[in-house]
Amino acid sequence: MSSLEPDLGPLTLWRNGLLLTLLAWLLTSLFYHQAFDSSPRPQALREAFTQARLVAESKSPPIYPSLDALAMWPLDRLPLDVAIHLWFFLCVISLLFSIGLFALAAGIQLHDAAPLGIMMIIGFRYQPTVLDFWQGQFDLPVLALLCAAYLTGSRDRIYWLAACLAGAALMKPWMIGFFIYLLIRRRPLAFIWAIILYASVAAALLAKAGWHDWSRLPRMMLHLPNLDLNYGFANQSILGFARVHFGPNPAAEPWVDDPIVMYSVVAAGFLALLCGLWLACRRAPAARGDRARLLFGLVVASLLMALPYCRAAYFVFLLPVFWTLLTADGITAPVRAAGVAVYAVFTQSFDAPHTLATGWDTLLPSAFFFANVVLWMVLLAAIRRRRIA
C-alpha cells in the first residue's frame, strides 16, 4: 500500500464506525428535541394511531386495510406517552435503515465515513422528516422499503425491485404510480409482476375486510376531485397550487379566479411532466449507477407533483435524491450546487398564514412545491448530461 492510499485497516474502520455511531446518537438527540419542541399537540399522533386502528379493522377508508395501518394500530392500545416514544424509535430506526440500504446501493463503504455522515445530517435535518413524525403517516418505514428498491435496482434484481415497489404501494396506494419506472426501464414483465403481487395481496386484505367494502370505491373516486379544495396550502401538488392561485379555496385570494386558467395551468403542468419523463425515457435502458438512481428520483418527484393531494411530509421520499446529488462522485458542480439550494428550502418550515393570504404572500406557503419543481428540472438536466456516472 502506497503512502497516498487510505489506511483501510481495522483501526480506521473502528474509528469511522464510532464516529458514525456518535453522529447518529447526536442527530437522534437533536431530532428528538426538534420534533417534541415543534408541536405542543401530541394528540395529533393519538388521532393518527386511532385512524390506523380503524383502517386496520376496516371501519374507515380505504377499501382494504393497508399494511401500514396493520403495523400501526397496536400503538392505539398503549398509553399516549409510551406510544409516542415507540413511534419515535420506529422513525429513527427506519431512517437509519434507509441510509444503510441506500449506502449499499451506492457502493458507499464504512471506510468512507464522509458521505455516510452527510446522508445522516441530510436525513435528520429535514423538515418533512419532522412533519412525518408528528403526522404519523408511516412514511419513514416506507422510505426504507423504497431504499431497498434502490438497492435491488442497483444490483439489477429487477423482480425484487418490482416486489419492493408493490410492497410500498400496499402501504401507500398512490405509490402504484412508481410502477411506471419499470416501464421506463423497458421491463414489462417486471411491471406485470408488480401488478400481480399488488393485486394478490390487496385481494387478500380485501377478503379479510369483507368483499362488501368494494361499495366504498365509487364514493372514494367521487371524493378525490375535492381533495385539493379541502386542504388549501397543505396540498403541495400541481392541482393544489392551481387551486390556491387560480380557483376558489379557503386559504388564499386567487390571483385569477378563472376555471379556464386553473385547468390550463394543471394541463400545462401535466404535459411538462409527461414530456420530461419522455426525454428521460430515451436514456433509461442504458441507465446505470447514479443515473439510474436519479431517474427513479425523477419518477418520485413527478408523482409527488401529479398527486391529487400531496402532503408536505411526502417529500421525505426525496431524501435518496439529495443523498445522490450531494454524495455521488459523478455529479457535476452546478447540479450539486442546485441540489444544495433545493435541500436548504426543505430544511425550513413554511406555515400557512392564519388569515386569508393575498398577492405575493401566497407564494411562500407553496415553497415545497416550487422546490420540487426546481429539483425535477435539476434531475432531468442531470440525467440528460453525459458526464454523470
Image: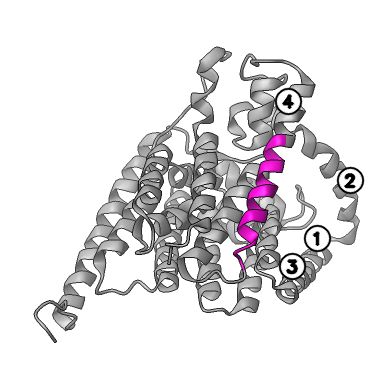
Q: CA distance from mark 1 to mark 4?
A: 39 Å
Q: Residue 323: image x %, image y %?
A: 40, 57
Q: Out of 41 and 272, give the one closest to the viewer.
A: 272
Circles 1 and 3: CB atoms closer than 8 Å: no
Specify the amino acid type for callout 2: Pro
- Residue where numbered disc 3 is placed: 198
Name the element at disc 4: helix
Circles 3 and 4: CB atoms closer than 8 Å: no
First in sequence: mark 2 or mark 1?
Answer: 1
First in sequence: mark 2 or mark 3?
Answer: 3
Q: Is residue 127 magenta?
A: no
- Residue where numbered disc 1 is placed: 209
In which quarter of the view is residue 182 placed? bottom right
Specify the amino acid type for callout 1: Ala
Looking at the image, can residue 78 be seen?
no
Name the element at disc 2: helix
Specify the amino acid type for callout 3: Tyr
First in sequence: mark 1 or mark 4?
Answer: 1
- Residue where numbered disc 2 is placed: 218
Mark identifier at residue 262: 4
Specify the amino acid type for callout 4: Met
Name the element at disc 1: helix
